[in-house]
Image (cartoon, rainbow, N blue to C red):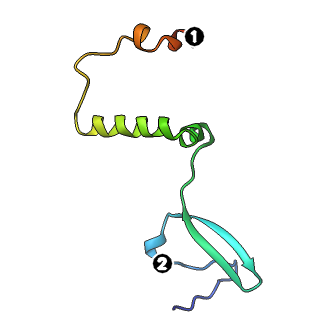
Amino acid sequence: METKTADSRGRINLGKEFANKTFVFEKIGETEMRLELARVIPEREIWLYDNPETKEAVLGALERLKSGRFAASPPNIDVEEPWMQELED
C-alpha cells in the first residue's frame, strides 16, 4: 500500500502508468472511494454495443480486413439484402 496526498486543488498523482486514462470515480462513503478504468463510447455508436449480433459481425469483418481476407466478388445487395432498398439516401 502506498500513501498519496492530495494537492491544494484535491488532485492526486496516480503515476505515469495511468497517464491519459479515463476513470469512473465512485464515492462510497466519507472515507472511501473507488476508481475504475473506463472507456467512453460516443452516443452515436452505442447502438452497436446494444446489439451483440451486429457488434460481432462488425468485429468479425474488421478482423477479416486486417488479415487481408476479402470477398471474391461484391454482394448483390438487391438480392441478398432487399430491406436496403427501403433506406433513404
Q: Mark 1 points at which residue?
A: 86
Apparent side of residue 78 relative to residue 45 in the rendered image (left or right) = left
Q: Which structural element holds mark 1?
A: helix
Relative vertical location of residue 19 with respect to residue 33 in this rendering, above or below: above
Q: Which structural element holds mark 2?
A: loop
Give the amino acid at mark 2: Gly
| Mark 1 crowd level (few <14, some 14–19, many ≥20, 10 Å Cα) | few
Spot occupied by residue 72 in the image (x, y as percentages of width and height): 22, 19
Residue extending farthest to the right is 30
22 or 74: which is nearer to us?
74
Q: Mark 2 points at which residue?
A: 15
Residue for point 62% across, 88% down? 5
Residue for point 52% across, 91% down? 2
Q: How many labels does the image show?
A: 2
Residue for point 36% across, 38% down? 60
Give the amino acid at mark 1: Glu
Residue for point 69% across, 83% down? 32
> Mark 2 or mark 1, which is nearer the start of the sequence?
2
| Mark 2 crowd level (few <14, some 14–19, many ≥20, 10 Å Cα) | few
Spot occupied by residue 22 in the image (x, y as percentages of width and height): 55, 62
Is the C terminus in the top left, top right, bottom left or bottom right quadrant?
A: top right
- Contact, CB < 8 Å: mark 1 with mark 2? no
